[in-house]
C-alpha cells in the first residue's frame, strides 16, 4: 500500500493513517514522497524513480495505490502503470481519497483521472454516487468497493466513554475564513468553537489553536457539544459523492453531528441517529436549542457505538479485505 511522505496536512494524515490500518492486515508500505503538483521531470527519470519505488512488488501481490499522491497526474498514471510493468501478475487496487480537479471546481478535468482509474482491477470509492459518476464519465473498472466512513483510530481511554452532559455549542476543526457558514455563525448563546491560527471577527466564534490529531479529538471530547459538516453550494456535487475526514474525527471524539443537507454522510447520520441533517445555520441553532438532555445523550450514545468502529479502523479494514477478495473472485 502506498503511503505519502513530505506532506503534513489532512491528505498526508489520511494516507499514513490508512497505511497503519493496512499493516494490521498484513500490507507493507510503499513509501512515496510528495514533490508537489508543479514538479516536472523528464519521462525517463520519472519512470526510473517509480521503478525503484515499486521494486518490492512481487508476483500476484495486491498493490493498493492511495490516490491522488498530490504529485502530478502524470506521476500517478506512471505509478499505476508501473505496477504491471514491474510484475505483470500483480494486481492494482486504487483507493480514491479525492478527485483532485473536483476539489477546486474544475469539473471538466476528469478525463485524465478516469484513465488513471482504468488501470485498476478494483476501485475503492466512498459510495455508489461516485461509482455511478465515474462510470458515466468513461470508467471501465468492473469491481467497486465502498469506503463509507473515514476511520480515526486511537487508544485514548477517555474517548471510549460516551459524552454524559449536553452542552449547547458547535465545534469545527478548520479555519472559518475558508467556510462562509462558520464566519457568519448566527448565535452567541450557542457559539461555534473553531481550531485555526487565524482569527475571526465574528463574536459568536471561539478560537482554539490547531492540535495534533489525537490531542484534537481529546479536546473536542472534553468540550463536547456537536460537530458540524458544512460545504459551500458550489461544492455540493463533490461532497455528495465524497467522504470528509471530519466525519470520522467527530465519531471518534464522540460528538453528535450536524450535517448540511446534500452531503454524502447525511444518510448515515439519519439511519443511525447520529445527529441531525440541516439546511441552514438557523435550523442548526434551533435544533440545538430545543434538543432535550435525554435526546442529546441518546445521540451521544449512538455516536459512541459508531465511534468504537472508527477508533479501531473498522471501515477501512472492511474495505481492504473486500478489495482483496474482489481481486481474486
Image: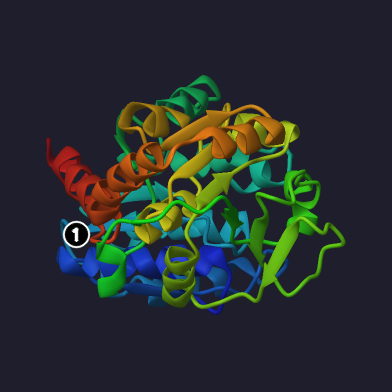
262 left or right, relative to 318 = right
| Residue drawn at x 36%, y 61% as measured from the top left | 152
Work out whether residue 153 or residue 13 is closer to the camera in this orientation and state it: 153
Helix, strand or loop at label 1? It is loop
Q: Residue at x 30, y 53 (%)?
A: 307
Image quadrant holding the N terminus, namely bottom left
Place of residue 209 in the rendered image (x, y in percent of width and height, measured from the top left): 65, 76
Q: Quadrant of residue 165?
A: bottom left
Say left or right for 29 vs 182.
left
**Quarter of the image that includes the C terminus:** top left
Look at the picture and state if 316 lies above or below 290.
below
Q: Of residues 22 and 240, which is closer to you in this image?
A: 240
Q: Which residue is mark 1?
A: 61
Q: Position of residue 130 (x, y in %)?
A: 47, 31
Residue reaching furthest right? Answer: 201
Q: Residues within 10 Å of mark 1 (few under 14, many from 20)?
A: some
Q: Position of residue 306 (x, y in %)?
A: 28, 47
Question: Height in image: 214 above or below 173?
Answer: below
What residue lies at 50% left-to-right and 65% top-to-bottom? 223
Colour approach in the figure:
rainbow
**Residue drawn at point x = 65 percent, y = 31 percent:** 236
Please tell me in which quadrant of the rendered image residue 273 appears: top left
Amino acid at each position: 500500500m502506498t503511503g505519502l511522505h513530505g506532506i503534513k496536512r489532512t491528505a498526508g494524515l489520511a494516507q499514513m493513517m490508512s497505511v497503519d490500518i493496512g499493516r494490521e492486515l498484513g500490507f507493507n508500505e510503499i513509501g512515496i514522497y510528495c514533490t508537489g503538483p508543479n514538479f516536472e521531470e523528464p519521462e525517463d527519470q520519472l519512470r526510473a524513480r517509480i521503478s525503484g519505488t515499486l521494486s518490492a512488488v512481487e508476483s500476484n501481490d495486491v498493490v493498493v495505490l492511495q490516490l491522488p499522491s498530490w504529485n502530478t497526474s502524470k506521476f500517478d498514471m506512471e505509478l499505476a502503470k508501473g505496477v504491471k510493468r514491474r510484475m505483470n501478475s500483480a494486481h492494482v487496487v486504487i483507493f480514491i481519497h479525492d478527485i483532485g480537479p473536483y476539489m477546486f471546481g474544475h469539473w471538466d478535468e476528469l478525463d485524465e483521472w478516469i484513465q488513471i482509474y482504468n488501470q485498476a482491477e478494483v476501485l475503492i470509492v466512498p459510495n455508489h454516487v461516485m461509482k455511478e459518476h465515474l462510470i458515466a464519465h468513461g470508467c471501465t473498472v468492473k469491481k467497486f468497493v465502498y469506503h463509507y466512513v473515514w476511520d480515526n483510530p486511537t487508544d485514548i481511554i477517555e474517548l471510549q466513554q460516551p459524552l454524559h452532559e449536553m452542552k449547547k455549542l458547535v465545534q469545527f476543526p478548520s479555519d472559518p475564513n475558508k467556510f462562509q457558514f462558520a464566519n457568519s455563525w448566527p448565535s452567541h448563546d450557542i457559539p461555534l468553537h473553531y481550531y485555526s491560527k487565524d482569527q475571526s471577527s465574528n463574536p459568536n466564534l471561539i478560537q482554539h489553536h490547531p492540535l495534533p490529531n489525537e490531542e484534537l479529538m481529546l479536546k473536542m471530547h472534553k468540550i463536547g457539544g456537536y460537530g458540524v459538516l458544512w460545504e459551500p453550494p458550489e461544492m455540493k456535487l463533490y461532497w455528495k459523492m465524497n467522504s470528509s475526514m471530519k466525519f470520522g474525527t467527530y465519531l471518534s471524539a464522540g460528538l453528535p453531528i450536524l450535517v448540511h443537507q446534500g452531503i454524502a454522510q447525511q444518510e448515515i447520520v439519519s439511519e443511525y441517529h447520529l445527529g441531525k441533517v440541516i439546511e441552514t445555520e438557523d435550523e442548526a441553532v434551533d435544533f440545538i436549542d430545543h434538543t432535550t438532555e435525554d435526546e442529546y445523550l441518546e445521540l451521544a450514545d449512538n455516536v459512541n457505538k459508531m465511534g468504537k468502529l472508527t477508533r479501531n479502523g473498522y471501515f477501512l479494514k472492511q474495505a481492504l479485505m473486500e478489495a482483496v477478495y474482489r481481486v481474486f473472485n
